[in-house]
Image: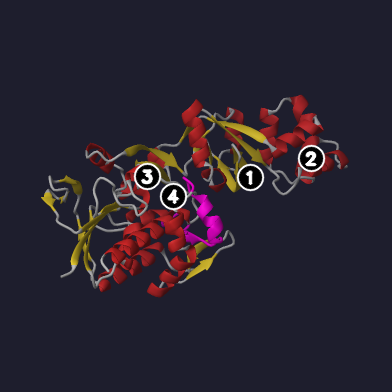
Amino acid sequence: MKKQIAIIGGGPSTFLLASFLDAEKFTITIYEKNKTSGRKFLVAGKGGFNLTHSEPIDRLIKRYTPAGFLDEALTSFTNSDFRNWLDHIGISTYVGSSKRVYPKEGIKPIEVLNVMLKSLKEKGVVFKYGHTFSNWDAANNPIINDKAIQADYTIFSLGGASWKVTGSDGNWRDTFTNKGIKTKMFQASNCGYQIDWEPDFIKKHEGTPLKNIAITCNTTVQKGEAVITTFGLEGNAIYGLSPQIRAQLDAQAKATVCIDFKPSLSLESITSKIKSSGFKNTTQILKKELKLSSAQIDLFKTYLSKESYLNTTSLAEHIKKFPLDIINTATIDEAISTVGGIDLQAVTSHFELKEMPTQFCIGEMLDWDAPTGGYLLQASASIGVFVATYINEKED
């Protein structure tokens, strides 16, 4: 007789888990509180549908925080494995100029989702919509729609706390905490960061991108682009520094990042270009010799003294290392992802709850972090496959 598997929550980690579970051994049921599956998956697709990132696996695994926690899952089901699986179910992918992996041009997020769901239904996976987890009974059976569900294995895939409109609200955390499972408060990640801009500067440059820059927080460097907003800064060049920025904010209620506006040039090269320029006006030198934008130049004019702006040594140093103070994060519901949720000490190396054997937690409900660009989805997929493989092998 087949054993029963209950998967609670219907997101990307669930889809991969269910896809790799052995249907010869298990009857698989997915319980989803919404009327449809994958709502956050679809919302994520509106901003550029990164399925994964193409960089070598030894570099990819270094993008995650805390270091090492996801290594085994990521190396067991790599970004290449993910692309191969997508191709197998009928989703062709390509690598963009940013090295991010996208569905083949013309394939929409809803089509990717529908192909995934179709493959699961053809496998015999049962979907039950409008089914909400609320607690456990005295025998640790999960209670769904006020009824205890008996299963040989239960896997929770309840998501983080961002984008409440998709159902990802994090309300489950209190239930787990009350059960004695160690959790952490949710915090925003991959979000905008608040900067107290000078009014005249932000009035002129709100919405302006800062392209081809590198931002440093502590010793971590992230290259890319950031957009100046009324709130502060957002974009991939700052999203990737979320762990470092949060650590500083938690410790001292302020974080300092430094922008390198010319990461391809050394300090010496910049100094030489300024000194040897045929232009006598500093602003013209920055525009013509260093190709800096009006917004970048106005940052120097606004935040440097006149003496520093006109001093070659000081100006060159600030082009390479321009400090900005961050005073807060955007709200959780404005964030692309969150950290917090299930404390990593509460699960084994196979994501099984230590206090509740045969029950697992996967995906974003665990306390790990990654930048945007396909990394979040890749880890969720890898965790799902890793747990499926582990459960399959237990029943051999």
CA distance for labels 3 and 1? 31 Å
- Indicate the secondary structure of the residue bearing disc 2: helix
Q: If you read the primary sequence from the N terminus, does the residue marked by circle 2 or circle 4 appear first?
A: 4
Where is residue 181 drawn, in percent x and y? 27, 41
Q: Is residue 372 left or right of residue 301?
A: left
Residue 231 appears in the figure: no
Q: Residue at x 69, y 46 (%)?
A: 263
CA neighbours of label 3 inside 10 A, class few (<14), some (14 to 19), many (20+): some
Q: Magenta segment, which residues?
A: 45-67
Residue at numbered disc 2? 284
Residue at numbered disc 1? 214
Quadrant position of the N terminus in the picture:
bottom left
CA neighbours of label 1 inside 10 A, class few (<14), some (14 to 19), many (20+): many
**Can you tell which of label 2 and label 4 is closer to the viewer?**
4
What's the amino acid at mark 2? Answer: Gln
- Indicate the secondary structure of the residue bearing disc 1: strand
Residue at numbered disc 4? 69
The quadrant holding residue 294 is top right
Q: Residue at x 42, y 43 (%)?
A: 335
Residue at numbered disc 3? 344
Where is residue 356 drawn, in percent x and y? 24, 48
- Indicate the secondary structure of the residue bearing disc 3: helix
Q: If you read the primary sequence from the N terminus, does the residue marked by circle 2 or circle 3 appear first?
A: 2
